[in-house]
Amino acid sequence: MLDNTNLRTIFELPKFIVVNFVPLQHCMVKERIQYIDAMRGFTMILVIYSHICVFCFKEYFIAFNDVLFLLRMPCFFMISGWLFYKATRIWDKTTVQQVVNNKFMVQIIPTFIFLALHERSDFFHQLGAVKGGYWFTFALFIFFVIYILSVLVTRKSKHQDVWMLLIALAISMSSSWYDVHYQQIAGHLGWGRYALGFLSFMTWRYYLFFYLGTLVRKHFDRFLRLTDRWEVFVAVAVLFFMMALTPRTSYWSWVYIRFAVSGICGMVMVFTFFRYFASWFTKERVLGRCLQYVGTRTLDIYLLHFFFLPESILLYNRQLLAYDNKALEVAVVLGEALAVLAVCLTASYVIRLSPFLAHYLFGVKPKTEKS
């Protein structure tokens, strides 16, 4: 038999759910996924690692850099796409304008400020495809725009994922073909090559991985069911290393197949590893705390690290190559990369003490704008 106390409890149940459960659910949505931040930190370290090889040692093939190159940027763009996708987002005019404006503030303005600071007198000569090394943030902004346009064009289709994948493949393949054949066709493009250079068109081949990142997030349960099988992970890892061991060639078709297959396998392999061993990368572990902190400062580190690459300080880098010892190369390059990373994090911390500098250099929203 129900008394007044029980009746009051029943009638107050909806209020209890609204007051307690909904905010808790909201907090769960807002909570950062720790192994994702750790993976971002790992890929950022790989970026510095690669630039130590290329800009300091002036060697592409040392310390397994040529192998890590195959998965480094695909992982970075895949994570960017994964984080960008939101199932609840409705792409109306207001949303498009807000997202583009926000991404422009975060990706473009800091990029050109740091490019101007780093290049100084050579600024206008660095506005081509690689932009003095600052092409990633510029290309990422382009990818945001391409993705939004693709969504708007295909939103009435029942097979939107398929059409958007075909668009991503077409863009990626066209960019790769342009990159491989640039020397042969540049003279026929006239001023068009400068426009394509400014748009960093030859880097658009990475859009495939950005879109796949959004697709993984959209169908995350299916992705988990597939990659939870150990035989799938082994097959992906074997295929990646088979692609890595194949000789480089000038044939565009094979260049693209190697690029796409190794990139997809690499990003699946790394993502699955970090998810499967997620307990290693929690804030309760030193490794997890360090990688997560780096993962939340990737933009800062990317923009700053070009200033601290030890091109002229370490005079004995070239002597290392004479030993022809891969383990020694990895140890030295990784040590230098971690030293550069530490300096970047220190500089980032100091710059972020100023809200004005944090806003315009790293796109940090003022506290009044944060929800």
Image (cartoon, rainbow, N blue to C red):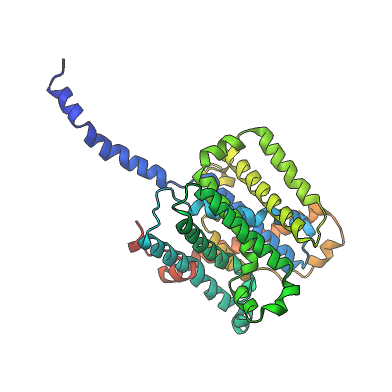
Q: Looking at the rendering, which quadrant does residue 100 occupy?
A: bottom left
Which of the image's four quarters has the C terminus?
bottom left
33 left or right, relative to 122: left
Q: Of 303 and 338, which appears nearest the observer?
A: 303
- Residue 341 in picture, x, y percent from top left: 61, 60
139 lies left or right of 149: right
Query: Residue 251, relative to residue 354: is it above or below?
Result: above
Picture coordinates of residue 241, whole percent (x, y): 76, 46
Q: Quadrant of the N terminus?
A: top left
Comparing 168 with 273, the one in front is: 168
Residue sitting nearer the eye, 353 or 292: 292
Q: Is residue 113 visible?
A: yes
Name the outermost residue toward the top.
1
- Displayed quadrant of residue 335: bottom right
217 above or below 350? above
Could you say which is closer to the camera, residue 254 or residue 327?
A: 254
